[in-house]
Amino acid sequence: MAKAYDLIVIGAGMAGVAAANKCASQGWHVAIVDAQSYGGTCALRGCDPKKILRRGAEIIDSARLMRGKGIEDPALRINWHDLMKHKRGFTDPVPHNLERELASHGVDTLHGQARFLDKNRVDIAGASLEAGHFLITTGAHPRPFEFPGNEHLIDSTDFLNLDTLPPRILFVGGGFISFEFAHIAARAGSSPTVIDRGPRPLKGFDPDLVDLLIGRSLQAGIAVRPSTTVTAVDRTDTGYRVILEAAGGPETIECDLIVHGAGREADLTGLDLDAAGVDWGARGVSVAGHLQSTTNPAVYAAGGLRRHSRNATDPGGCVRRQGRRVQHGQRHDTDPRLRRRAHRGLHHSGARQSRDARAAGQRERPGHRCPLQQHQRLVLQLPHRRDHGGRQDPRRPHHRPGRGSPSPGP
């Protein structure tokens, strides 16, 4: 017989851990599972370890900017081995500490690949587990390439674990991860090159700021090559030969390391979401209000794993109906705890559906929220922001502190 939980969280990153702890603190019977070490991308393979490496690069850069102005730095350099040792001193204790924290809240910590058996059951390491609700927070992985030799590329996780930093590094993709790593590598003594298939890298950012960044990149010794794609990679005795298709025609460059920085997609591998009746794609799980699956009300998705359905953002359609259900506690969930508490969720969700519901003339009613809704903003890590003039950012919903959500960060 399957063991039953109120909530099973699939993915032990920051979003999943926060949700598991909050729900357990409200009396839910919660389990969390991950096939990798607890901590997820941000704490182990992304934001936090990157900041440690970046700090070393910032010190080098600051000293260079003060040359001739009272600071002499002829022997100042990054010892990559020691910097990585310092980074591991931060990341290595994270999994154990997180599991201990979860256990202190009464959360069952599991290890292995979760696979859905049906709408309310998953298989984990051969054991069948049942739950009234599931939260998927498995993060993202690098988008696959199809050119010959793509297996020679490493991803951001591998870069953040390099024991030595080679002199010639090629970053494929002109996103912010490539630029961050390229600037770190340049300050550590490497000669990085960033290629991007578009005419301008970082296309989602302000063009004037991008131009300034490109200028600073060139000053730091980083080569930036727009309108360039990789067509093949060959291994050589000294490194790699990369064949490029550039604006002027085919070219070849030699390098010692190739880093994938061309985007990521939802990591839903092995979950067998079709068995659970969950609509999903490369951009993630299709969700409506409260990050709830549009096809299986027992399933939620957070972080980079959700994609809002077209109807879910239409104030004249699904959102208005969903807003009425939420306001009056008439959601299609069968759990009475969710029905009683649901109508407070939209106001604090931080999602587009809330704004659409209010634009349609609907009002949120007071009441209690289920733990998933109550801490949805914490799960999503979307702090409310204000501009430099102190005015409320029009892209963010109004937030009143002291209503069960964490106060906004700086």
Image: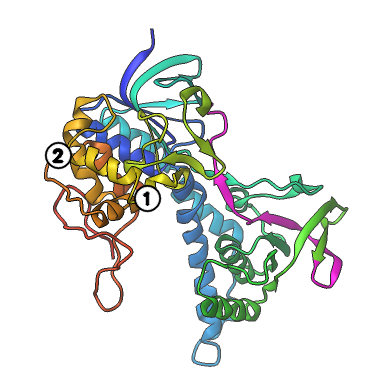
Q: CA distance from mark 2 to mark 1?
A: 26 Å
Residue 353 colored in magenta in the image: no
| 171 up-or-down from 309: above or below | below
The answer to which of 166 and 272 lies nearer the viewer is 272
Residue 260 colored in magenta in the image: yes
- Residue behind mark 1: 314
Secondary structure of the residue carrying numbered label 1: loop
The answer to which of 238 and 335 lies nearer the viewer is 335
> In the image, 391: left or right of 77?
left
> In the image, 214: left or right of 71?
right
Q: Which residues are magenta?
A: 246-272
| 173 up-or-down from 146: above or below | below
Dividing the picture into quadrants, the one containing residue 104 is top left
Residue for point 60% across, 54% down: 263
As shown in the figure, which amino acid type bears the numbered disc 2?
His
Residue extending furthest toward the front: 316
As shown in the figure, which amino acid type bears the numbered disc 1?
Asp
Whether residue 39 is visible, yes or no, is: yes
| 34 up-or-down from 47: above or below | above
Residue 368: mark: 2
Secondary structure of the residue carrying numbered label 2: loop
Label 2 Cα crowd, 10 Å radius (few <14 / some 14-19 / many 20+)? some
Whether residue 113 is visible, yes or no, is: no
Count of number-bearing discs: 2
